Image (spheres, grey):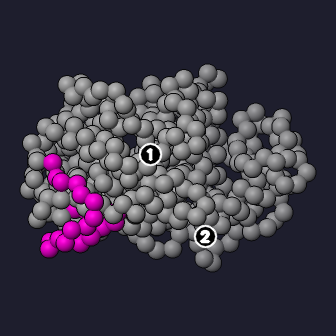
Amino acid sequence: MTRNAHRIRWGTLLLAVTLLAGCTRSVAGTGGVERWSSTKVAGLEITTGESGPRPGVGNSRLTASGGDRGPIDQLALNAVDDVQRYWSEQLPASFGKRFEPIGRLISYDSGGAGVEVCQASTAGLVNAFYCAGDDTVAWDRGELLPTLNDSFGPMSVVAVLAHELGHAVQFRLGTASGITAQTSSIVKEQQADCYAGNFFRWVAEGNAPHFQISTGPGLNQILSTLFFIRDSAGTGFDAEGAHGNAFDRVSAFQLGFGDGPVRCARINEAEVRDRITQQASGDQETVDGDAGNLRVDDRSALTALQTTLRAVFESSGARPPAIVVGAPDCPDARRTSPASYCPSSDTIGLDLDDLVRIGTAPQRGNRGGIGDFAAFAEVASRYALSLQRSAGYPLRGLAAAQRTACLTGVWAGAIVAGRGAALQLSPGDLDEAVAEMLTPDSVIAADVDGASVPSGFARVQAFRDGFSATGPTTGAAATCVGRYQ
């Protein structure tokens, strides 16, 4: 985050929010009302079972040129087999077109002698990709896929290949997916992430022959994978080969998981430019070293945070809670770190040591470091509990946790919408929020005692609900308190 030293003009700053009771949200195209359930994610039960290859299932008979027939290649081939099976069902059902299997599969070792694929050498190419010119899907079995498997589990490998086959789907659909020679990279990549979400919905429903995934920890692994392979902070969405930051990639994946392939095919330039949070190259502020990461224990930074929170939520009519250093005794709530909310005194207590640890950018020797926006969002989440208390909502339970994540998203969206705000987002800030909500002890998506929904997917979805709903002020918070009851 960055701090704005210019004078704040309250009349034009940010979006004020009114807490409204009894609201529901209509779902476009369904004619119905979307109902939230603490036991479901995107309509599926939240499960915590095994994720990965199904035990006792034979391997695919597919082969890859250059492969070594090792376990990583077999994992990749099984993934391709299941993804192709999905699209062989869905392309006719959704678009009336037959799915033609991929023309060629290639496995290579980026650390070995290069081979020519798509008119380029694979030497040193730590990647997986689809080449439309000869209808090829290729992957690096030497470094990329083993790293993903070791870091996030086997389903991360499946996720990467589902994304690459999403590109094959685009080119098979052509104009039905809105893809032309002039289509920007970011649109193609957002569509491919969305198509991958379609596939994983099918897996989560138990349809995949070779793989299974839980909607709790299993989907968390997929979102963590998208975080890992996100664009680096400062990459413009209009850059050649841009895929999107973690927040935008997760958003596209969640669109696909919650809806069908036709929804993904509707992702176009206009939608991406309206929805994407990654700025254009010319609009990016240069971030050198830690220049975009404030010291969260700095007095002026904490004052700017409090000023922004009050500005965003001033029209709620609620008295702003006190924010103090330390954790005063609280008879009616458990302590959460690095920020706690005490309902009886309407006070937010800060543990500065923990706040600094979380607010420091990840680096060697700083276990648990995420970045300044993650730390400030955790404080904002406790502020959101004060708003709920003032409006008479329960502060305990999974609905309260989801309302809290959603209202924190409202705060984040308001900062993006405002100009000249006391705090402004730097490249990568929203990705820090995603990273925090994928941790086991997320505070952004926790109730007053620190309890949260076990699905990181559901937490991020609630935050996105608030972030995306920011508009004429009353509708944003209404989305949060109306849906999460």
Q: Quadrant of the C terminus?
A: bottom left
**Residue 219 shows up from this direction:** no
Q: Which stretch did the figure color magenta?
A: 320-341
In x, y percent, where is residue 11? Answer: 19, 25
Extreme-bottom residue of the structure: 56
Whether the magenta-drawn stretch holds residue 337 is answered as yes
Q: Residue at x 68, y 72 (%)?
A: 58
Q: Residues within 10 Å of mark 1 (few under 14, many from 20)?
A: many
Q: Quadrant of residue 147?
A: bottom right
Image side of residue 295 versus residue 16, left or right: right
Q: Residues within 10 Å of mark 2 (few under 14, many from 20)?
A: many
Q: Nearer the viewer, mark 1 or mark 2?
A: 1
Q: Residue at x 12, y 62 (%)?
A: 345
Q: Residue at x 72, y 48 (%)?
A: 127
In this view of the protein, which residue sits in the foreground, 29 or 192?
192
Q: Secondary structure at mark 2?
A: strand
Whether the magenta-drawn stretch holds residue 210 is answered as no
Q: Give the amino acid at mark 1.
A: Leu
Q: Quadrant of residue 403?
A: bottom left
**Residue 311 shows up from this direction:** yes
In terms of sequence position, does the residue under pointer 1 or pointer 2 come before the other? 2
In x, y percent, where is residue 97? Answer: 57, 38
Q: Residue at x 83, y 37 (%)?
A: 120
Image: 269 above or below 299: above
Extreme-right residue of the structure: 113
Q: Give the amino acid at mark 2.
A: Pro
Q: Secondary structure at mark 1?
A: loop
Which disc, if any, is residue 294?
A: 1
The residue to which callout 2 is attached is: 53
Q: CA distance from mark 1 to mark 2?
A: 43 Å
In x, y percent, where is residue 32? Answer: 23, 44
Which disc, if any, is residue 455?
A: none
